[in-house]
Image (cartoon, helix red, strand yellow):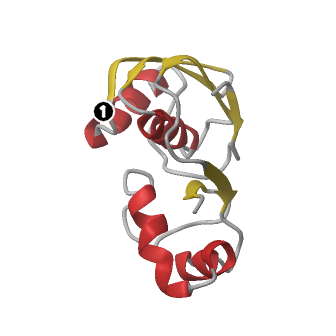
Amino acid sequence: MGLFDFARNIGNKLFGSEDEAPEKIKGHIEEENPGVSNLEVSVKDGVATLSGQAESAEAMQKAVLMAGNVKGISEVHADGLTAPAPVQEVQYYEIQSGDSLSAIAKKYYGKASDYPRIFEANREVIKDPNLIYPGQKIRIPVE
């Protein structure tokens, strides 16, 4: 999966100093348990590095998004996070000002009413379908 870029100055504020960032990000990912075992997180200069074993490509993608959508993180390296090959193709989308999950669903699937599909694919990343923010990155399952 390699490297992902994120907006460093937006997202969930989980830590006050970079020294506490690895523990806070690891706890954040493990709390939702997207399917990653032996998770290790390190953070240096706003770059989070993840390692461990993901039970699926989806679990790996969610862990990366959960780490990257944290305020203070500008990149996520996941070369040390192993996972099986993906069974479903996904695209990544960065939320823009004025977006809603319905509008995104209309853009990708042709029907605004398909927004639950996007919400379910990002349940660990998005807690409430009405609370998304510009700069947040999410997964869009490809039909």
The image quadrant of residue 55 is top left
Amino acid tagged 1: Glu
Q: Position of residue 7 (x, y in %)?
A: 70, 47
Q: Position of residue 121 (x, y in %)?
A: 44, 57
Helix, strand or loop at disc 1? helix
The image quadrant of residue 27 is top left
Q: Position of residue 60 (x, y in %)?
A: 47, 33
The image quadrant of residue 117 is bottom left
Q: Residues within 10 Å of mark 1 (few under 14, many from 20)?
A: some
Residue 121 vs 54, above or below: the answer is: below
| Picture residue at 66% right of the left edge, 64% below the top | 95
Pick the front one: 18 or 137: 137
Q: Position of residue 138 (x, y in %)?
A: 57, 55
- Locate residue 30 relative to residue 134 in the image: left or right: left
Pick the front one: 142 or 36: 142
| Picture residue at 57% right of the left edge, 63% below the top | 143
| Residue matched to label 1 | 30
Residue 126 in sight from this viewpoint: no
Quadrant position of the N terminus in the picture: top right
Residue 142 vs 85, above or below: the answer is: below
Residue 30 vs 112, above or below: the answer is: above
Residue 115 vs 24, above or below: the answer is: below
